[in-house]
Amino acid sequence: MGRYVRCVLRYFATTLAPRVRVTLLVPDVLPALVARRYLEDLPGDAAVAHRSAAGRLGLDVVWYPWNGMTWVAPGTKVATVHDCWPFVSPAPNGSIRRNEQQPFFATAANADTIIAGSQFARAEVVRHLGFPADKIVVIPLGVTIPPRQGSAPSGDPYVLFVGHADARKGMGTLLAGMAALPDALRAKYRLIVAGKGQPGNDGPAPDGIRVEFLGQVSDALLADLYTGASAFVFPSSYEGFGLPALEAMSYGVPVIASDAASIPEAAGDAALYFPSGDVPALAAAIQLMLGDAQLAAHMRSAGLARAANFSWERCAGATLDALSRVASASALRL
């Protein structure tokens, strides 16, 4: 979500600047003291103001890009709902899930329009929130096609995973799948995990595999990791879009992915799929991808072509069009 917000706002502030002026509404009591931190990655003349000022600024529309509304502004409102995971995830404590669901309920009650990243996410909003389908706009996310390849990390070849190392993302399935590989492949290939979470979040790593949990990494290191990966595995069981798979494709990395949720919608025919949660099937897919150079080359080519269809410029333009339509319709009603 952070990448989504940053990339869209950068296009708002540059290419699309003649059409929009951005004000960041922040929770900090003294916005002037933190404005530089909020604006350090945002070119142009964006302003920063406290949320309480939203009704006094003459804003045409307030956009909530962070998966629902944690507060409600006056006037016209649009929210991006990336997924409805708090309604799907098993709840260890019912009150915890209810708290997580509140921003979604606030969105359903107050948004004039909802933006979803996929048809799957749109259907989830209708199913869990009862929001009218005709008021949901589907705008796929984008990727930045790297202008040149970075430098691959040194060491033995590796399989890459990017995302939160937890059960939802299929970390247990991935670890077990790597452990089920033939001895020769397990000896040759490492597993690198880039993202929040550490071993133990989904059980300890099985014996016999080499796995490196790097935690959250910089954009520069992430680019290097994509560049050097022999294969990218995305075993998630629930996604509103599936951005890491497309990011890997944009670097020419062959992708293996589960067939769950929105992932096939995002990855199209450019991924080698396995049934979500099926460890033997995942192990077979990894073995096939690593052992068949012709298949890997085909998937690299297909992935590059697929990623070229998704850009942040297109995503930002479609988002601004949606915001403009809602603002215009609201002005006509006044």
Image: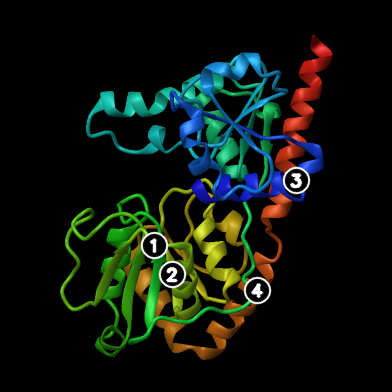
Q: Nearer the viewer, residue 311 or 219?
A: 219
Q: CA distance from mark 2 to mark 3?
A: 28 Å
Q: Which label sits on residue 317?
A: 3
Q: CA distance from mark 1 to mark 2?
A: 6 Å
Q: Nearer the viewer, residue 253 or 236?
A: 253
Q: Position of residue 33 (x, y in %)?
A: 46, 33
Q: Identify the amino acid type marked 2.
A: Leu
Q: CA distance from mark 4 to mark 2?
A: 16 Å
Q: CA distance from mark 4 to mark 1?
A: 20 Å
Q: Which label sits on residue 221?
A: 2
Q: Residue at x 51, y 31 (%)?
A: 32
Q: Secondary structure at mark 3?
A: helix
Q: Secondary structure at mark 4?
A: loop
Q: Which mark is nearer the camera, 3 or 4?
A: 4
Q: Which residue is mark 1?
A: 217
Quadrant for the C terminus, please: top right
Q: Earlier in the sequence, mark 3 or mark 4?
A: 4
Q: Are marks 4 and 2 in contact (CB under 8 Å)?
A: no
Q: Position of residue 265 (x, y in %)?
A: 60, 54
Q: Earlier in the sequence, mark 4 or mark 2?
A: 4
Q: Position of residue 288 (x, y in %)?
A: 44, 82
Q: Is residue 192 above or below residue 219?
A: below
Q: CA distance from mark 3 to mark 4?
A: 21 Å
Q: Is residue 245 above or below residue 103?
A: below
Q: CA distance from mark 3 to mark 1?
A: 28 Å
Q: Which label sits on residue 147?
A: 4
Q: Earlier in the sequence, mark 3 or mark 1?
A: 1
Q: Secondary structure at mark 2?
A: helix
Q: Identify the amino acid type marked 4.
A: Pro
Q: Are marks 1 and 2 in contact (CB under 8 Å)?
A: yes
